[in-house]
Image (cartoon, rainbow, N blue to C red):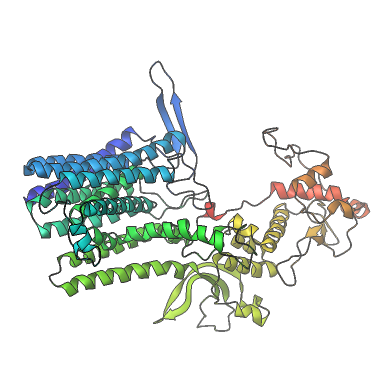
Amino acid sequence: MGIFLLGAFGMALLASALFCLLALGLFPWFRSGERKPGDFRPDQSAGSGSFQIEVRRGRAKPRVVRARSSELPLVGGVAMLFGIVLACILSGMLLNLNTDQWMLLGIILLVTVGFGIVGFIDDARKVYRGVGISEIQKGIGVILISGVAAGLLNRLVTSKDVTTRLAYPPYTQTPLIGQLLIKQPHAWLVFFIVMTIIVASATALAVDFSDGVDGLAGGLLFSASLAYAAILLDEGGPQRLPLIIGALALAGATLGYLPFNWPSSWRGGQHPRGKRWAKLIMGDTGSLALGGMLAVIAIVGRQELLLLVIGGAFVLEGLSAVISARILVKFFRRFLFVERFGSSRGFPHTEFPLPFLATPMHHHYDLLNVDKKRLVYGAWLLGAGLAVLGVATAVGPFTWERYLGRLVGLAILIAVWQAGPWTKAFFIGLEPLNTVQPATPRRLILCHGAPFRLFGMPLYRRIDAASITDQALREPAERLLLWQRLSVFDARALLGYFCYREGDIEDAHRIWDRIPDGNIEARPDLKEAIAEVTHAIAIQKGGQPPHHTDGMSGDASSSHWRAPTPSSGLNPARLQPLNGGPYHGDAGAYDGAMLWQANRWAAASGLTPPSSPSQDPGRTYPPVMSEPPAQPPAEESLREMAPLSASEDIASNAIVAHTSFPSAQRPSEAGDL
């Protein structure tokens, strides 16, 4: 029998790998076109890159010719489903299952396919309509399948060891409700249906939340299913044979899928880095189906409470998304008044005291620029450790061993959860001291974590470094800001300001570019400083002509202005003439507006930009000059030239700023904070 059980694992592995190959060859165009709103990453599995399907219409049905998308094909889940069903049926035939065993195995496979259908509908809508089903629709579908599973298990499974018609421990031993479940008619039926809906729906959705990084959900499912197979094998009994077959088939299918979804250290976006090893993803079809199957096996095996330990990684992923995004954000928007902004609305939710930068939890560490491969390997190690603890808890001969295993598992989950708020805090520090030359100035660095060392090891991680040193901190109050924990947005704003004040506008622009637009809008002073720096960089990119007069360039369009360094505060002064003299143009034409503002350019040049892009989609404003600029006048003629009018100066500066505007990279493009 043991060989046949191993055969279930092997057949599922080979079938899953084979179906993945076939699906990848036959349906490479089955790719998601969904675009999710918000500032995040363009290389994730929902909302990246361009998407287009070319269809050739012939005499018969339209035929897909080519699909262009940065997404991976959503065929891994379907391939694993076929592998699991095939391996379970063949193993059942080889083991000569009886009628009751076939009934239980059939219910498990039917429920698994039902969850998969809900996920496939979501995946298909992403492919053909560019948007999946809503969260409410997905939730209703998962709850309906869970309810059907509860009814089938309670009414059709009658074997003594696996029946769910009668209440079983630990529920019968629970104070208050134990006797109620035993004595009151239909009390256990209602309780079992509600419990199955909660456990199966939560597990399926938690696995779905975890499927956001290559290899993450597949590796965690592999360790969890192997743990349940080990527990069921230890308990023994012929009626548990379908559960063992299902758990081993689930483990084999995920192992056969992992080579096609192996994690890598790649980064997407406008500036991709590294090679992505994954060739396909499981999609909602696989995550909902396999999560639901794991939950049903745990429920029928009467080990559903162990899911909190064995599936602890899924618990963390699901709770982080529900608590942070679904509960805390809505609660804070309604009841939390932020004194800094004088309101509870009008600023991004990332300004709230949330436990994570983004949810589910793996996105939090992804935004911290943690290497993806190391992140997934660490999650696999966590899942394997929790799986071992779960097995030890179930098979331990002594009560104290079982309770100790549960307490250790709970402590690990709490520690991992607390790592989120701990790593969410940022601070500005100094690079390590040069022991050879202690008097050497130390550069300012940006770190996240806690500004401490434990046993000589830092409890923080360096994220960024500025070009300026601690000598730029002029006041004692500024030195007090070092090593103080701040939000990532305030820490970057402060570090960029120090660079800006010292005249290193390139470094200030680079540091500020990592702050999302919404958080910049919530800081008007920072927004104004970024505008000044952006314009100053644009002028510098315009180049300097070879002729100079009194320290001034002959190119009047860019050299008469400079961005002065503010003396203090994040409220930089306006652009001033380079020679420090008075401005001779029409002061009313300037009016304190940004020099590169489109309507100012239009007013100065006599052109009117279109009110909407559809009026003139082929033209850009300010327009690109089709003729090369004239040669600068000689040095003698420059001395005789009258000062430019304000409108001419504003217009010329606008053209320079437009044509040499540095490309901004928000976190949605750059990939980290």
The x and y percentages for residue 188 are 22, 54
The x and y percentages for residue 562 are 77, 60
Answer yes or no: is residue 370 visible.
Answer: yes
Question: In the rendered view, does 5 fall on the left or right side of 26?
Answer: left
Q: In this view, does 231 lie above or below 78?
A: below
The x and y percentages for residue 163 are 14, 51
Q: Is residue 640 above or below residue 617?
A: below
- Figure label count: 0
- Residue occupying image coordinates x 46% and y 34%: 129
The x and y percentages for residue 486 are 55, 71
- Residue occupying image coordinates x 34% and y 59%: 315
| Residue in the foreground of this view, choosing between 94 and 395 | 395
Question: In the rendered view, does 228 fall on the left or right side of 531?
Answer: left
Q: Is residue 329 above or below residue 653?
A: below
- Residue occupying image coordinates x 57% and y 54%: 666
Q: Quadrant of residue 148?
A: top left
Question: In the rendered view, does 540 fall on the left or right side of 224?
Answer: right
| Residue in the foreground of this view, choosing between 311 and 154 | 154
| Residue in the foreground of this view, choosing between 115 and 651 | 115
Question: In the rendered view, does 44 fall on the left or right side of 632?
Answer: left
Q: Residue furthest top?
A: 59
Answer yes or no: is residue 17 visible.
Answer: no
Q: Is residue 95 above or below residue 176?
A: above
